[in-house]
């Protein structure tokens, strides 16, 4: 028994040292020695809800599309999709959902679904567009909430493997120890989302086609992790991922049934993060079409670009046709 207790003590101590080391490594990576600049491929758009980083492709007068990424991403993960959409005549606008990527970090640490939805609306106002929303995974929550908050601001919504959480507002969930502690969340983030060595294994957990986790894709996802303050910002954001929103319309079936905007759903049949049954329920509630991609997991735009792009372009054609 003494041997077991001793071994457990050593393992716990070693794990603690490892977490401390990972947090220190994250701090070193995120030291901002030079003035912070966004990537040259995009620009900062000033909105009434804070500065937002966007990347745009396609003709400026093309039908506008606004693309929202998921929880481990940023706008650049849409680049192959944007190129395909631009070739069809669309103006494809991807943006970084705060605090991810190169958008601003809220001093009030408000990353609730309702506030994020207001940021989406504010961005459309700043850009002067009435877009179709294309929203993946965690980004689908703010997108749907925005469409329900101000439907006249949008021309439609395409949900891709959406992490909506229908009826989740009925659950009594809260952050428990240790993630209820901000410092513990920073340790967890530094060991995963902002740890360059962990990005590959983390990405593969979401994929059915594991080979899609190429070195190029992993490097792209890691790019914002060296930005000053990223670990702390993601730790501030983490509760919005782990605890369902209580005051959001988008978790309520009746709000989906009342939605009058054109809607479409795209889902991978091997999605284990937001299983296909969730997409089927949303399609049933709305009567909207559901495109099912065979042998595809949670991130179809990375796993199966040709199949995904074909399904997306087909869905968009029923909402707003591309420019001639």
Image: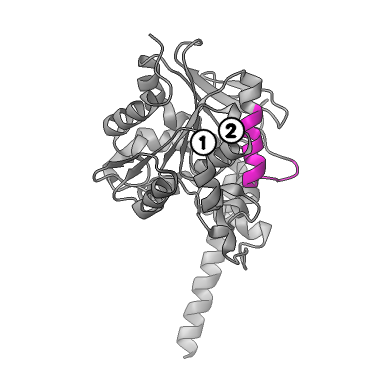
Q: Secondary structure at mark 2?
A: helix
The foreground one among 97 and 157 is 157
Which residue in the protein does label 2 denote? Answer: 151
- Asked if 283 appears above or below 67 in the picture, the reply is below
Q: Is residue 71 magenta?
A: no
- Single out the mark in the foreground, 2 or 1: 1
Measuring 36% from the left and 35% from the top, which residue is drawn there?
Answer: 301
Image quarter of residue 48: top right
Q: Which residues are magenta?
A: 107-122
Q: Secondary structure at mark 1?
A: loop
Which residue in the protein does label 1 denote? Answer: 260
Q: Are marks 2 and 1 in contact (CB under 8 Å)?
A: yes
Measuring 40% from the left and 14% from the top, which residue is drawn there?
Answer: 89
Q: Position of residue 168 (x, y in %)?
A: 54, 59
In this rendering, position of residue 263 left or right of residue 108: left
Q: Is residue 133 visible?
A: no
* Number of residue marks: 2
Q: Position of residue 103 (x, y in %)?
A: 62, 32
Q: Which mark is residue 287?
A: none
- Asked if 256 appears above or below 264 in the picture, the reply is below
Q: Position of residue 51 (x, y in %)?
A: 67, 28
């Amino acid at each position: 028994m003494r041997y077991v207790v001793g071994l457990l003590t050593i393992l716990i101590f070693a794990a603690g040292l490892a977490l401390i080391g990972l947090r220190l490594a994250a701090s070193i990576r995120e030291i901002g020695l030079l003035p912070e600049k966004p990537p040259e491929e995009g620009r900062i758009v000033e909105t009434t809800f804070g500065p937002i980083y966007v990347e745009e492709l396609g003709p400026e007068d093309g039908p506008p599309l606004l693309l929202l990424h998921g929880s481990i991403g940023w706008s650049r993960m849409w680049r192959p999709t944007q190129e395909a959409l631009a070739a069809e005549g669309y103006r494809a606008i991807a943006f970084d959902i705060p605090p991810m990527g190169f958008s601003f970090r809220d001093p009030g640490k408000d990353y609730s679904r309702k506030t994020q939805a207001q940021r989406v609306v504010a961005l459309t106002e700043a850009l002067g567009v009435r877009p179709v929303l294309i929203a993946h995974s965690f980004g689908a929550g703010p997108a749907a909430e925005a469409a329900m908050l101000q439907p006249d601001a949008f021309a439609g919504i395409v949900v891709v493997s959406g992490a909506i959480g229908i009826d989740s507002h009925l659950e009594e969930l809260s952050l428990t120890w240790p993630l209820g502690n901000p410092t513990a969340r920073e340790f967890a983030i530094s060991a995963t989302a902002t740890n360059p060595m962990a990005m590959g294994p983390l990405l593969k957990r979401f994929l059915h086609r594991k080979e899609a986790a190429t070195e190029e894709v992993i490097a792209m996802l890691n790019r914002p992790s060296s930005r000053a303050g990223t670990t702390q910002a993601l730790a501030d954001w983490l509760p919005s991922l782990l605890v369902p929103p209580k005051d959001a319309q988008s978790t309520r079936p009746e709000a989906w049934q009342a939605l009058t905007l054109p809607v479409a759903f795209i889902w991978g049949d091997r999605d284990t993060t937001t299983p296909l049954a969730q997409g089927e329920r949303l399609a049933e509630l709305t009567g909207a079409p559901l495109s099912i991609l065979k042998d595809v997991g949670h991130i179809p735009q990375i796993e199966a670009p040709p199949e995904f792009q074909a399904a997306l372009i087909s869905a968009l054609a029923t909402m707003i046709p591309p420019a001639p």
